Image (tube, rainbow, N blue to C red):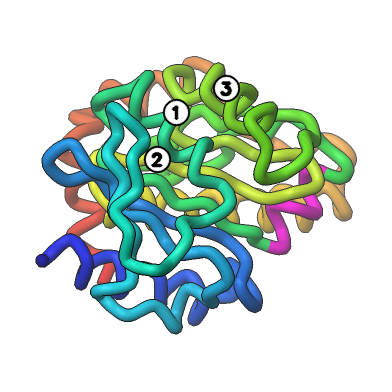
Amino acid sequence: MEIRQELCKYAKKTVENRLVVGPGGNISAKHEGKMYLSPSGFALDEIQPEQWVEVDIESGEVTDIGLRPSSEVLMHLYAYRVNPSIGAIVHTHPPYCIAFTLVETELPIMFPDQAALVGKTVYVPYVLPTTDKLADALVEKVNEASSILLGNHGLVTTGRNLREAYYRTEVVEESTKIFLIAKQIKEQPKVLTKEEFEEIASLESEAYRIQLLQKMK
């Protein structure tokens, strides 16, 4: 199945780009009423196509292939249920994103690619991982933004497909890095005004977003 090959591709990218280390993070994609989720205990770049765990989104039933789904299965499941437009979810532990959540809660919009590809990023205070409490906290935000910073934990991005969800992860990690560097130099870095952000959003933003994704390999 093509979706399994695509999951392997982006799982490897998360490891290659140091967005996760060890067996951390989890990603999933939706296909015909099912979600295909990384198995528990695997480093993402170790997962073979047949090892992605199939879960029925409506019932939560797991196809028994001898592997357990990621311990964050509820976070993925709840998100797909409340926002049918989501086609993929990427949960990673990017170092700059985590560092940002230790000192800040609001990530401003600073440059055009961030404005066009990601837009608003929201924040969820620390919640114990792998619990229904974290799933409940996340699900309150998935209709508000496509990128969610988890305090002292990491990042969740969503997209219509894996490509979009994954590149949002890269852009948010770059955004937090830029912000933290700029803040060391100046207490109040210059960010885009609301008007500047809205101007970018109105400039055929959909076409611009697609153009950005096409340039990314």
Q: Which residue is mark 2?
A: 158
Q: Is residue 99 magenta?
A: yes
Residue 100 in percent (x, y) is at: 77, 47
What number is the disc on residue 78? 1
Q: Which residues are magenta?
A: 95-101
Circle 1: is it few (<14), some (14-19), or many (20+) Cα within 10 Å? many
Give the residue at x 40% y 19%. Answer: 198
Tally of marks: 3
Secondary structure state at the residue bearing disc 2: strand
Pointer 3 or 2: first along the chain = 2
Residue 166 shown left or right of residue 103 in the figure:
left
The x, y position of residue 186, in whole percent, is 86, 45
Is residue 164 in sight in this rendering?
Answer: no
Kindly report the distance in space between the C-alpha atoms of the residues bearing marks 1 and 3. 34 Å
Residue 1 position in % (x across, y down): 10, 66
Q: CA distance from mark 3 to mark 2?
A: 25 Å
Q: Gap in Å between the C-alphas at discs 1 and 2?
A: 13 Å
- Give the mark nearest the N terminus, 1 or 3: 1
